Amino acid sequence: MANSFRTTALRALILIALGSAIGIGNNLLAGAHRRLDWISDYPALEARNDRTGGSRERAAPSGHALAATQGSGSLPQDLSDISIPEPNPDELAVEIDPLQAARLYSNGAVFVDSRRSREFVEGHIAGARSISYWESAVVAGRIEELAWSAELDDPIVVYCNGGDCPDSHALSELLWGAGFVHVLIYRDGYPDWIARGGATEKGASR
Amino acid sequence: MSRIRALLGGEWLAVRVQIGLGAVFVAAGWPKLVDPPSFAKNIWAYGLLPDGLINVQALTMPGIELVVGLALILGVWRRGAATVAAGLLLVFMVALSRALIEGNPVSCGCFDLHAAPKSDAELLRDLRMVLLRDVGLMAMALHGIWGPRRGADV
């Protein structure tokens, strides 16, 4: 009986070791976009709950937010009276509404897609660059590339899949940590952009 | 009555139970093995593990699920595989129970890591169903541990 138990326990351990080895080998052979570092810093769990409200560090959208979110119609032609939040080194990120996102887009602001690169390839805001928060093997390099091509006080608009998606909030923490002081979260994200008829394109990040 | 007992204790049922359980584990392990970042995000959303263990679990658990599933399907080391399956199911059930107790509307992440967005109420209802399903799978795993087996199979 005891012998049988020992054999079962040993075989269970061997199966666990074999499975772990397959997982680790798979990770070593995986492409950069589906490879994981052994350890990553993940955002505080409040980011997960941002679907119902921002954390203390983040400012909620203001001004015309209500009007902008009441419907998902097309965007007005004249966006010149839409105000944009100023850079603030003390604020992690500011959530913006669709009209503010449209104004920033027309001003040529950098748009960053924080969704998985697979989703980015399938469709994204035209001209956006991909920095997928969860692809830990590439995220640091992508932020470094951004830092080379943009000033730290340039407006950086981060988006993902809208209200249920924590990716943009999580990525904004990394961008803020990298020194960017004007990170703006387009909270309603890509689904809203499509619904409003914003410009989109397909394909990998440049 | 004796017929039911014979069926429950017979090799015929044991083989089908282990193949069914194995198929579930293979189906669960494969999507996670091919997309570790999505699985890591799912683990993070449960809020149970410290940051340092999230990626370790995301990298090792899918392979273990796959190996255990294949062992059960092929009838290799059935009792050892069923023991690991029972251990994994226990971990899943604890995670699901805690999410339900805290009212944390997390996506199960059991098979489909790219499920369409659902409302919080739908997610919590799904978690209850998944927990119920895991109770059934646990019964299958326990049958694999203590059920009938061929002489050399431990």
Image (cartoon, coloured by chain):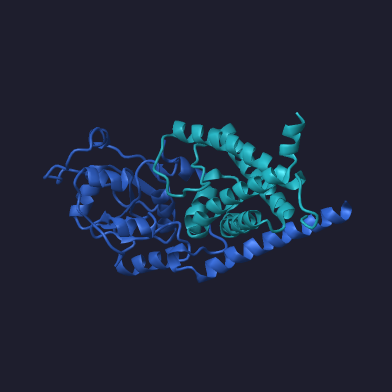
Query: Is residue A44 in view?
Result: no
In the image, farthest residue toward the right: A2
In the image, farthest residue toward the top: B1
Q: Is residue B17 above or below residue B129?
A: below
User: Quadrant location of residue B61?
Assistant: bottom right
Colour of chain B in the rendered structure image: cyan
Residue sitting at 64 percent across and 46 percent down?
B16
In the shown orientation, is residue A103 left or right of residue A3? left
Rendered location of residue B150, percent (x, y):
77, 53
Instruction: Name the residue nearer the viewer: A37 or B137.
Output: B137
Residue sitting at 48 percent across and 62 percent down?
A136
In the image, farthest residue toward the front: B3
In the image, farthest residue toward the left: A77
Instruction: Name the residue nearer the viewer: A39 or A91.
Output: A39
Q: Count every numbered label the image shows and give the total.
A: 0
User: Quadrant location of residue A82?
Assistant: top left
Quadrant occupied by the N terminus of chain B: top right
Rendered location of residue A77, percent (x, y):
11, 45
In the shown orientation, is residue B78 left or right of residue B133? right
Instruction: Name the residue nearer the viewer: A122 or A10.
Output: A10
Residue sitting at 84 percent across and 54 percent down?
A4
Q: Is residue B35 above or below residue A164?
A: below
Rendered location of residue A155, percent (x, y):
29, 55
Q: Is residue B141 above or below residue B122?
A: below
Rendered location of residue A138, percent (x, y):
43, 66
Residue sitting at 66 percent across and 64 percent down?
A18
Q: Is residue A139 above or below residue B122?
A: below
In the shown orientation, is residue A166 left or right of residue A123? right
Quadrant occupied by the C terminus of chain B: bottom right
Query: Is residue B85 in view?
Result: yes
The chain in blue = A
